Image: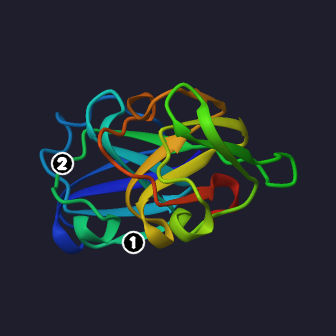
């Protein structure tokens, strides 16, 4: 179980709404979200209902304004608690491809990668296969910027993981986040 508290104003002021489980539509409970406290667990929050739109991974801690979770707006419309498995039980593996449909040059990773450019010869990542464990993709180096949660499956083109015209620049294994 997790526990997350959404506040309408910055610095944990104003109307608040607490959740301990997933929620598809938050709009009727919180009109805007300017600060968040994550008291238990890790969460993926989404700018749109039904787990869609830009998504942000939040681990335990305080986020006094929406810029602290790298958002450009105060819109949070759904949330999903992340059930983490001990990294001792999960073997992480992801295959990155330079072309859609899992074609072209491939790079396989089993560890976090803070900056794909420079680490690999791939010009860009157009498709990928999550073979083991869950991963978070980031559009900026050092695990910053927009994020995308990926579970084991094939992602044959970037819209399959929710990205459109976005380069993936860093990746991290979910179980290693505290």
Nearer-the-camera pick, 161 or 17:
161
Marks 2 and 1, how far apart in space? 17 Å
Q: Residues within 10 Å of mark 2 (few under 14, many from 20)?
A: many
In percent of width and height, residue 35 lies at 25, 64
Image quarter in which the C terminus is found: bottom right
Along the line of sight, the residue nearer the viewer: 51 or 5 = 51
Front-lying residue, 115 or 35: 115
Q: Indicate the secondary structure of the residue bearing disc 2.
A: loop
Q: Residue at x 60, y 30 (%)?
A: 102
**Residue drawn at point x = 36 percent, y = 40 percent:** 163
Q: Is residue 175 above or below residue 93?
A: below
* Residues at marks 2 and 1 touching, judged by CB atoms closer than 8 Å: no
State which quadrant residue 151 falls in. top right
Residue 26 is at least partly visible in this image:
yes
Return the mark for residue 62: 1
Which one is earlier in the sequence, the residue at label 2 or at label 1?
Answer: 1
Q: Quadrant of the N terminus?
A: top right
Asked where in the image residue 88 lies, by quadrant, the reply is bottom right
- In the displayed orientation, state which residue is furthest to the right: 88
Asked whether residue 12 is in view, the answer is: no
Q: Is 109 on the left or on the right of 16, as rendered?
A: right
Judged by depth in the image, the label closer to the viewer, 2 or 1, is 2
Q: Position of residue 99 (x, y in %)?
A: 51, 35
Residue 91 location (% of width, % of height): 83, 47
Which residue bears the numbered disc 2?
75
Residue under the point 27% across and 73% down: 64
Q: Secondary structure at mark 1?
A: strand
* Residue 130: image tag: none
Is residue 168 found left or right of 76 in the rendered image?
Answer: right
In this view, 61 is above or below 59: below
């Amino acid at each position: 179980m997790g526990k997350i508290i959404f506040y309408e104003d910055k610095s944990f002021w104003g109307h608040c709404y607490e959740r301990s489980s997933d929620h598809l539509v938050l709009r009727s409970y919180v009109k805007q979200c300017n600060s968040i406290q994550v008291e238990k667990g890790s969460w993926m929050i989404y700018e749109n209902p039904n787990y869609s739109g830009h998504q942000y991974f939040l681990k335990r801690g305080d986020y006094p304004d929406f810029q602290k979770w790298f958002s450009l707006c105060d819109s949070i419309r759904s949330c999903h608690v992340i059930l983490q498995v001990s990294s001792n039980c999960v073997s992480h593996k992801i295959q990155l491809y330079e072309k859609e449909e899992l074609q072209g040059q491939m790079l396989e990773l089993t560890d976090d990668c803070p900056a794909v450019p420079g680490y690999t010869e791939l010009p860009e990542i157009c498709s990928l296969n999550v073979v083991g464990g869950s991963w978070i993709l980031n559009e900026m180096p050092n695990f910053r910027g927009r994020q995308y949660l990926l579970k084991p499956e094939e992602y044959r083109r970037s819209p399959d993981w929710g990205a459109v015209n976005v380069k993936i620049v860093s990746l991290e294994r979910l179980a290693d986040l505290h």
